[in-house]
Amino acid sequence: MKKLFLSTILLITLSLAFVSCRDTKKTDSIETEVNKAAEKTEGALEQTGKAIDNAVKETKEAGEATKDAIEKIGDN
């Protein structure tokens, strides 16, 4: 009976020692890092969108210039 009582107390003590000493600072720092990464990628996505818009505009202008050149050649 004495061994059962002591082993139960030992198990409770060990479980409390592992459960009660959680490090909450790590979860806070992870959330902070995720927010920082989200802010950085947001700016990168905006820049990528602008670059794509510029590329589309330049491609359209090049297509129109090519069309004009073909028409000039066809007229001669």
Image (spheres, rainbow, N blue to C red):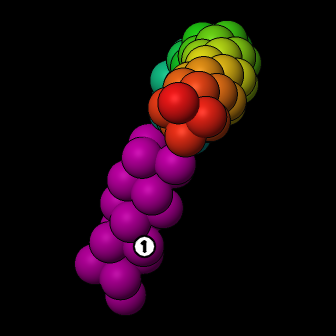
- Residue at 32 percent across and 72 percent down: it is 7
Residue 70 on the magenta segment: no
Where is residue 31 shown, x and y percent of the image? Answer: 64, 26
- Residue at 35 percent across and 60 percent down: it is 10
Count up the numbered dots.
1
Q: Amino acid at mark 1?
A: Thr
Quadrant position of residue 46: top right
Quadrant position of residue 55: top right
Where is residue 72 shown, x and y percent of the image? Answer: 59, 27
Look at the image and tell me whether residue 2 can be seen: no
Residue closest to the far left = 3
Q: Is residue 71 above or below residue 31?
A: below
Seen from the viewer's position, the closer of residues 41 and 55 is: 55
Seen from the viewer's position, the closer of residues 34 and 1 is: 34
Look at the image and tell me whether residue 9 can be seen: yes
Residue 13 on the magenta segment: yes
Drawn side of residue 42 relative to residue 37, left or right: right
Seen from the viewer's position, the closer of residues 29 and 76 is: 76
- Residue at 42 percent across and 73 percent down: it is 8
Q: Is residue 10 above or below residue 1?
A: above
- Residue at 42 percent across and 46 percent down: it is 18
Drawn side of residue 10 relative to residue 60, left or right: left
Q: Label 1, secondary structure: give it.
A: helix
Drawn side of residue 3 relative to residue 16, left or right: left
Residue closest to the far front = 76
Seen from the viewer's position, the closer of residues 59 and 22 is: 59
The residue under label 1 is 8
Provide the residue span drawn in magenta: 1-19
Q: Main secondary structure of the magenta part?
A: helix
Q: Residues within 10 Å of mark 1 (few under 14, many from 20)?
A: few
